[in-house]
Image (spheres, rainbow, N blue to C red):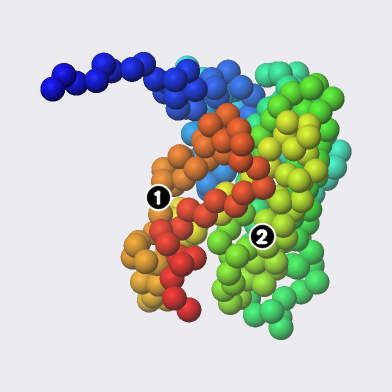
Amino acid sequence: MASAPHSAPLPDARPAPVFSDLDGKVALVTGAFGGLGRHFALTLANAGCRVALAGRRLAEGERMLAEIRAAGGKGCVVPLDVCDADSVSGAFFEAEQALGTVEIVINSAGIATTGPALETTEQDWARVIDTNLSGAWRVAQYAAQQMRDADRRGSIVNIASILGLRVAQQVAAYTAAKAGLIQLTRALALEWARHGIRVNALAPGYFATDINRDFFETDGGQAMIRRIPQRRLGQPSELNGALLLLASEASAYITGAVLPVDGGHLVSTL
């Protein structure tokens, strides 16, 4: 019996290089000079983005920029304090002057304080909320205004946490801020979709970084790892696919989503 002739794929079904649209786009990453923010900035640079490295530790930013340029990438360093509206507008102005209109924003600036809720001070509470939630709001709002005025589609990725979906002890302000950031993501996605601006959240679980490495070697840290279904910490590189998906046009019909990357932690039993 003769086989059926092979038919060509429909136009919309033809495969395209994944994330190729990121090449040449301008991205601004807050909290870019350490932790996961640093990793996100380098990941976008490796994907071909022109990256504005935004934060307060400018000397580290210059070292990162040299690393990006040595690999053939492009970028700039801009000072940014997300708790200061004038600093936010200034950072976007400098980024646009150096690289062009920002089309991708990664809101990764954040801090945490640990301790019993009964002993959390007003100052500590306000500092975490202002940085992790209000700071993300300031950056997202200004970015969206610039995108709208330039008639540009854009993607804003807020770095939330699985602690915005479930709680842990000793980090009340942090969990409240991340829960607020998740709901803010959904609210902004709803309002800004008409402008072609997508807003999504990436919610990492526990990842190995220089900041937490010592803790996860303690008995308490090891017990926490055992509660993760995959029985291990994530590696920063395991966030790359989710980050590039949400930043790129590969997720053009995704907005208001919260994407956990946590080794199954959220579906573990209580």
Circle 2 Cα neighbour tier, 10 Å, few/some/many (<14 / 14–19 / ≥20): many
Residue carrying label 2: 178
Can you give x and y, in whole percent of width and height, for residue 6 in the image? Answer: 28, 18
Can you see residue 112?
yes
Can you give x and y, in whole percent of width and height, for residue 43 in the image? Answer: 49, 34
Q: Give the quarter of the figure containing the N terminus.
A: top left
Can you give x and y, in whole percent of width and height, for residue 22 in the image? Answer: 55, 24
For the residue labelled by badge 1, is the local secondary structure a helix, a strand or a loop? loop
Q: Is residue 259 left or right of residue 29?
A: left
Q: Looking at the image, is mark 2 or mark 1 earlier in the sequence?
A: 2
Report the front residue among 66 and 30. 30
Q: Is residue 190 above or below residue 151?
A: below
Mark on residue 235? 1
Q: Quadrant of residue 121?
A: bottom right
Residue at the extreme left of the image, as rendered: 1
Can you see residue 91?
no
CA gap, disc 2 and disc 1: 21 Å
Looking at numbered disc 2 in the image, what kind of residue is underneath it?
Answer: Lys
Q: Is residue 13 above or below residue 164?
A: above
Looking at numbered disc 1 in the image, what kind of residue is underneath it?
Answer: Gln
Q: Quadrant of residue 124?
A: bottom right
Mark on residue 144? none
Report the front residue among 77 and 136. 136
For the residue labelled by badge 2, is the local secondary structure a helix, a strand or a loop? helix
